[in-house]
Image: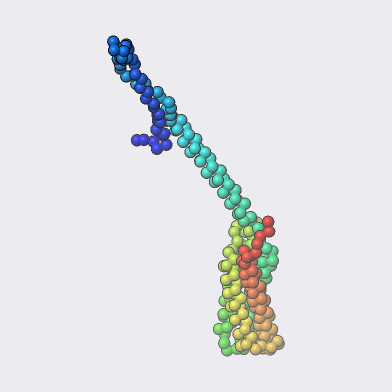
Amino acid sequence: MKNPFQKQPQKETQQQETTTVVNAWESDAGEHIETVEGVQTVTITEKTEVQDHHHHQAVVTDSVQETEKIDHEADKADIIVEQEVAEPHHKPNKGRLFFRFWQVIAAIGAFGFQVGATPYSHQPMPFSTKGLLYYVYAICWVSFLWSLFMIFVYLTRRFGHAGKVKRPLLFVVDLLLAAMFGVGIFYEIAEYRCPPGYYDGWCNFFNTGLFFLMSLFVTYVLLALWDLFGGLSFLRSKQK
């Protein structure tokens, strides 16, 4: 099989014919007579170029090694760039910890005061519709568990190298809880008209629980906005 990289020998030849005169004499009539013995052909090689096969293999090997070296250096450069682009580990924000800590306390307070109104006053619930209270109790427990989980995430990030919760998930959960607390507060104020001091102190406990519910609503709205604007930080150009 022919190597396409091997150059074929190039030869340039030149032929020269010479005539050898063996005998020459003058005839009686005065004519000049020559006898030709033979024709000699001389071949002169002017240029011969032959590509050495081993030299070609050496050139190809050097070229392959040079290509592998360039690829290796490119891979090293890509690794360095990825390390520089990788986001450094940031400590969690203490402001978020404060909000979550307060949400744990507020969830316990809202649930405890509204449930404890009847045992404290020795009066049954003065309103006929109890389903709204059960709804509020349920979202208080959901808020309690969610806030505890976020405190756990804060501690694992602060004293370890655990990852943070994705901002879209934070935004959705905080916004959902804010909406649920907003609905509960609105209907409690509209349905349960309970002035302070009424029903032997039952309304005092109920209204205290309502205060904690309102604080939960406000903190979840603030955290949802925090999540939203924090997630839109990619729109801002980074300082070099």
- Residue 112, can we see it? no
Q: Quadrant of residue 101?
A: bottom right
Name the residue: 66% across, 82% down. 206
Where residue 91 appears, as percent x and y from the top left, is 66, 59
**Residue 86 placement (x, y as % from top left):** 60, 54
For this orientation, the residue located farthest to the right is: 197
The quarter holding residue 188 reads bottom right
Q: Nearer the viewer, residue 173 or 198?
A: 173
As displayed, is residue 155 above or below residue 134? above
**Would residue 60 appear left or right of 36 to someone viewing this image?**
right
**Number of marks in the rendered image:** 0
Front residue of 56/211: it is: 56
Vertical side of 77 occupied by 223: above or below? below
Q: Quadrant of residue 113?
A: bottom right
Quarter placement of the C terminus: bottom right
Along the viewing direction, whichever of 72 and 12 lies nearer the viewer = 12
Image x and y of residue 232, in percent: 62, 67
What's the image's color scheme?
rainbow
Vertical order, 103 against 7 (above or below): below
Q: Nearer the viewer, residue 10 or 127?
A: 10
Q: Is residue 62 above or below residue 133?
A: above
For the view shown, which residue lies furthest in the front direction? 29
Task: Residue 36: tell me if it is visible.
Answer: yes
Residue at figure coordinates x 41%, y 34% from the top left: 6
Image position, residue 123 (x, y; %): 63, 86
* Residue at (65% x, 89% y) in the render: 193
Q: Quadrant of the N terminus?
A: top left
Residue for point 60% across, 50% down: 81
